[in-house]
């Protein structure tokens, strides 16, 4: 979980202490909301940066994106465990 200071979420210490790849201080994920360093880890919400949108600072750290990511993450966890193709998340 991220904390809010001023204009959005700030990266948390737990992120830096993990062995997951970070991007701009947040967990780095691909378009499937899958960790770019640990393919068995999926994440969403204010604690991620999507590699393909990092230069644009998009999507913003806002709850509406986290809510929309949830169903994609749930489906992708199921697909990953079932050896099926993953669904892409398009913000």
Image (cartoon, grey):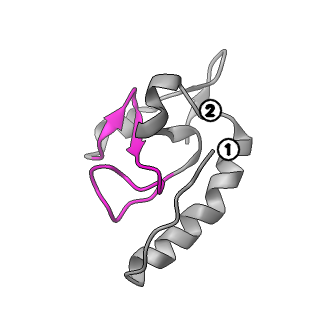
Indicate left or right for 12 with 38 as reference.
Answer: right
Q: Is residue 38 above or below residue 57?
A: below
Residues in magenta?
20-43
Tell which of 56 and 15 is nearer to you.
Answer: 56
Q: What residue do we see at 36% from left, 32% from top? A: 23
Task: Look at mark 1 in the image and give the residue it sits on.
Answer: 65
Percent x, y of residue 76: 50, 69
Number of residues whose C-alpha sits closer than 10 Å to that of mark 2, classed few (under 14), some (14–19) or many (20 or more): many
Residue 50 visible in the shown view: no
Indicate left or right for 72 with 28 as reference.
Answer: right
Residue 61 badge: 2
* Residue at the extreme bottom: 82
Q: What residue do we see at 65% from left, 47% from top? A: 66
Say what secondary structure mark 1 lies in: helix
Percent x, y of residue 69: 62, 54
Indicate left or right for 44 with 30 as reference.
Answer: right
Say what secondary structure mark 2 lies in: loop
Q: What residue do we see at 69% from left, 35% from top? A: 62
Q: Is residue 38 above or below residue 78?
A: above
Q: Quadrant of residue 7?
A: top right
Q: Are marks 2 and 1 in contact (CB under 8 Å)?
A: yes
Q: Quadrant of the C terminus?
A: top right
Tell which of 25 and 71 is nearer to you.
Answer: 71
Is residue 40 on the magenta stretch? yes
User: What is the C-alpha distance between the residues marked 2 and 1?
Assistant: 8 Å
Q: What residue do we see at 34% from left, 36% from top? A: 22
């Amino acid at each position: 979980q991220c904390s809010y200071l001023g204009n959005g979420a700030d990266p948390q210490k737990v992120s830096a202490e993990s062995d997951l790849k970070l991007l701009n201080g947040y967990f780095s994920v691909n378009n499937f909301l899958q960790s770019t360093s640990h393919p068995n880890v999926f994440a969403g919400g204010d604690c991620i940066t999507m590699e393909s949108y990092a230069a644009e600072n998009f999507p913003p750290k806002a709850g509406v994106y986290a809510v929309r990511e949830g169903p994609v993450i749930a489906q992708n966890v199921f697909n990953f465990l079932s050896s099926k193709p993953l669904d892409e998340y398009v913000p």
